[in-house]
Amino acid sequence: MVVTIILDIDGVSYVCRTFENESIQINKLVASIDNLGSQGTITRQSFRLPLIGGLLEAIGDVTDPSQSAKVNLNKSIKGRILVDGFERFFGSFFVVNTTKGDSKEVEMIFQGNETDLKATLSNITMAELCDGETIAYNYTEIQPYFYEPYQYMVNNGYLWPVIDYGDKFTYDDNASVGYVNELFEVNFKPAITLQKLFDLMPINITVNNMQQIMHQCILLHNNKNKIPVLTTSPLDNTGFFLNITDLTLSGNQSATKVTWSAVSLYNQVSAPNWSIQNSRYTAPVSGTYTFSFEGDIDFVYGSATGIARIGYVIETGSTLNSAASLNRIIVYSNTGTTSHNREFSVNLIAGQSIYLQYTSIDVGSATFKTNFYFRLLQAPALNANSLVDVPANCPKLTAWDIFRTVAIQSNAQIISNPDGTYEMTPFVDWIEDNSEVIILDDIIEDGVDVQIKPFSVQGAKSIRLGYKENDDFYSKQYKELKNENFGEKFIENTGTELAKNELKIEVPISTIPSVLVDFSQAVIPKMVDSSGNLIVGKPTILQTNYDVEGTQITNKAFTDFTFTLKSLFNNAVSAIVTNVPFIGNWRFQNGGYDETDNNFGQSLSYWSSVGYPSQNLYERYWKTYLEETYSEQSREIKMNIKLNRNQIDGLKFNEKFYYKNTLLRLVKLEGISLTSNQPATATFMKRFTIFPTDIATYYPYDVINSIVQWKVSADNSSVGDGSGETPTVEASANAYGFFYDSNQDIATQSGQILIT
């Protein structure tokens, strides 16, 4: 057989070397996220190539430091491996070493195309992935989300979740701040679904059997502002009042408003905020506003004790919030003409007004000369034409981080298709999705020992699955109370006494607990610190709740957060919202034993002590794999097998392999010859099912009013709550992680409501 290596550079193919009658081997691994993430690619081989001919022409004399390489040696070089003229492997070559002696050689590592997935996605930030994406930031855009949230999410790929960004939401009508009555555009930031992000990927990736995971979203929040970064400018709301003739105020003046005769605007969209009639500016949105007044003022004093003051006044409606005497900008006690350019900044709440006020005692007159200005220099960027600039609001993540999040949550296998597309399928589905049976007893190499060893030799003492720790108050309190991150599953002891290490499987994004809103049963996330103030937090995934088939769940998927949605720009529109989509790790706020939980393990909640779902990510996606790999019955089996080239190329790694009537799964092939049909070394893991009878006498099948209901493991007959069977119930409760109530001789699922 003849093996040929070809490099493809800028559309030109270079034949680098042909191997004939040499032992050229390659390795293949199962396509798991672990292998891709560590660059332990599915197909991998190193080659030593003479630096002559096509290779020299392609990359230059890289053994000579005085010469520049023709390619970037830090980057991959696309290439192919041909066997007997047929293209067998596509991927990338990396230069790892060069030698120069009697001849010049280059050592290169070949990695199959599946590694390109990580290389490509790691170089794309989430902001770059979302380049050009915008969403209207107004009532017309937001209201449909609360009317038909599922349809809005599917059509647009975005959500408008209710989150406390330092608003201190409460239903206590005596509260001085935070009372939930009317919410406006500025109370919301959007979130983008994982499905939308996958649709934006530069690589076609199909996700199978995990629609519920793809409905989760990443919060578009990366700063300490309550509103998102917009496409409009902070200058759009700016402008100034001015006088086109002198304005003279004579004698003693008590809290007199400075009036204006004209207004000039940077953008006419802000016209409703400027009132010549009332000589005041009204803030369209909460935030920091920077003002100045500029021009000449003539003062004429009536006595030596005369004094005049200029200040600003902030009002909410007709209610005085701050008097000019407390906000003095200038105090005068001398006659004369002075020129001014004074700048000041204030925090205004949407709807508040500001104007200049003049007071005087024993002053003859004050004349505000022609072209005296009251100018707004900078304001929050929001106006009726604002769009959310999606890339500018993206947290610091890469496309690879997003891909890994889905892969780790679902323990996905990644399948590379010949057309360059990819598929992701949960291991629990992928491993069963192949009916082909291969009897290893028939193809094992004669005279070579079969090695069988418990995985404790290279396994793990403990296993931890979870999310990155977040910075919000409730995540930190959870860790303080439970000594583990919110959403985590910790297997403290796998049973091995040899291995001492901990296997840590961590999603590169944080999650966030949902919390009760004061004086209500509504549950929402709160992106706040211990004082209730807004924080940036870590990149955060929001666990939205729609069913596996992708349809909206009735009112069970909502929480009772009631408010009137209004617009800052159109007083004629409003909508009464009686509930909002529930955001939380449980599928429903009320939970349910058979329901799903998008955390890895059972995390005590801040709103309920009952109803904990049993179907968390560990149970749904990871339990079978980890038990087969790290438990007492785990076995690693290594043998040499005889398969021809076509058989090896056709392996999907989820075939059903049998050895001595024992079911195995293939995890690695080493030493696959490209030039002959020599046996390859195969590594398998034993497959098995841990039955209820292996765990305890009883197994749980339901929880009613917090009381665990049991069935007999041996025959599936129901024994109700099992009361009266003290040793058996207690042992079964301990085996399955329930609390045993010795007073009532029952097991309960009751946890604690976390109160801070």
Image (cartoon, rainbow, N blue to C red):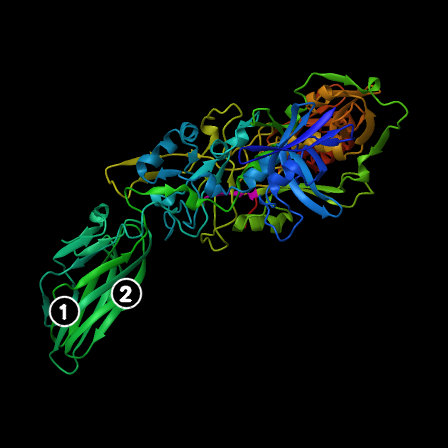
Residue at numbered disc 2: 343
Q: Nearer the viewer, residue 10 or 717?
A: 10
Secondary structure found at label 1: strand
Answer with mark 2 or mark 1, whichever residue precedes in sequence: 1
- What is the residue that sits farthest to the bottom in this orientation? 304
The circle drawn on residue 420 is none
The circle drawn on residue 253 is 1
Measured Cα–Cα span from mark 2 to mark 1: 24 Å
Residue 448 highlighted magenta (yes or no) = no
Residue 512 highlighted magenta (yes or no) = yes
Q: Which portion, as a residue range, is magenta?
A: 509-517
Count every numbered label the image shows and give the total: 2
Decide: few, some or many residues near mark 1? Use Cα within 10 Å; few <14, some 14-19, many ≥20. some
What quarter of the picture does the N terminus occupy? top right
- Pinpoint residue 647: horizontal percent, then vertical percent: 73, 19
Is residue 527 found left or right of 421 in the rendered image? Answer: left
**Residue 568, above or below 432:** below
